[in-house]
Amino acid sequence: MAVLTSISDAEARVVARDYALGELVRFDGIPAGSVNSNFALVTDKGRYFLRIYEEQGDAGARAEGELLAKLAAAGVATPAPIARGDGSGTIGVVAGKPSAVFPWKDGTHRCQASVSRDDCRRVGAALAAVHRAGEGTVRDAGRFRYEDLVERIARIASATDAALAAEAPILRAKLDVHTARRDAGLPRGVIHGDLFRDNVLFAADGSIAALLDFESASDGVLAYDLMVTVLAWCFGDALDMPLVRAMVEGYESVRPLSDAEKRGLVAEGCIAATRFAITRITDYAMRVTDGPRVIKDWRRFAARLAALEALGERLI
């Protein structure tokens, strides 16, 4: 999440009117992340979340809205987009870009030091619920296919920062090696692709209040999505195996893994770690913006990759 497009008071009032949200009291940018622009809208009826899609066109925004509605209807803890007051669907236009409004969900995020085994079990089960609920849904391959990552590596190679440019051939070699290890027969379906700690809200009783930010949702390998989540939740200074086991246990309580998936977890994790090292260079280290933004260090995923490579063939 981020604030890459600024909006005026008048534009915020139009959003409140178009979605029948009540009279606007105030709006605040949410300065976190790198992909979309996000705002908290407060009206006399309550609080809402406005997203402006920076990289997806109208079709992509509508497809995401339809997916979220389907997941929410199936019981997944994620807010569905709010319909516009005129009955024209859920997607609007703000500052010339597709936009959507969601109910505001209260809750807290976990810092890495506070993540518990119970947290990991709940997150694993919630991710498996997404995979179950998404069965039969057709999604495109998203923005992080092998060829997309190769193109990003080429951008890194041309970086003005010589230290970053020097990482390009290393990342290309890692991507090629671990992609070649992938079992092409592993189950596929709708994946979240980005279920990091800042995309999960916890209620006061420890249950999951909401899964957020399905902007990266796509067709993908389900075991890959599990490993993205493992790497996001189960790594502090090193891979925390009790947390890893708890997350896999939670996942399997909803969707058991096949033997092939279990054998493929390390390779899928290596692909995931390489992907995030690449995109954190292109989306953070190489991006220049005037607005406030959280900086995420790509080296954290280089460390995750090294930890997985040291494991050998099996994660669990």
Image: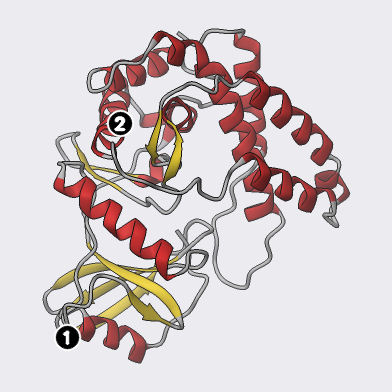
* Residue for badge 2: 123
Q: Quadrant of residue 83?
A: bottom left
**Residue at 55%, 17% in the rendered image:** 266
Query: Could you tell whether 240 is left or right of 43 in the image?
Result: right
Q: Left or right: 274 with respect to 292?
A: right
Quadrant placement of the C terminus? top left
Neighbour class for label 2 at 10 Å: few (<14), some, many (≥20)?
many
- Asked if residue 230 lies left or right of residue 159, the reply is left
Residue at figure coordinates x 22%, y 83% from the top left: 18
Task: Name the residue at the left extreme.
Answer: 45
Secondary structure of the residue carrying tag 1 is: loop
Sequence-wise first label, 2 or 1: 1
Position of 152 relative to 28 (above/below): above
Q: Is residue 202 above or below residue 87?
A: above
How many marks can you see?
2
Q: Position of residue 146 (x, y in %)?
A: 64, 39
Q: Which residue is mark 1?
A: 23
Q: CA distance from mark 2 to mark 1?
A: 36 Å
Q: From the top left corner, tell me how far across and down residue 72 is, in percent.
A: 19, 48
* Residue 99 vertical placement versus 131 (above, below): below
Tell me if mark 1 has few (under 14), some (14-19) or many (20+) residues whose alpha carbon lies within 10 angstroms of its own. Answer: some
Kind of residue indicated by mark 2: Val
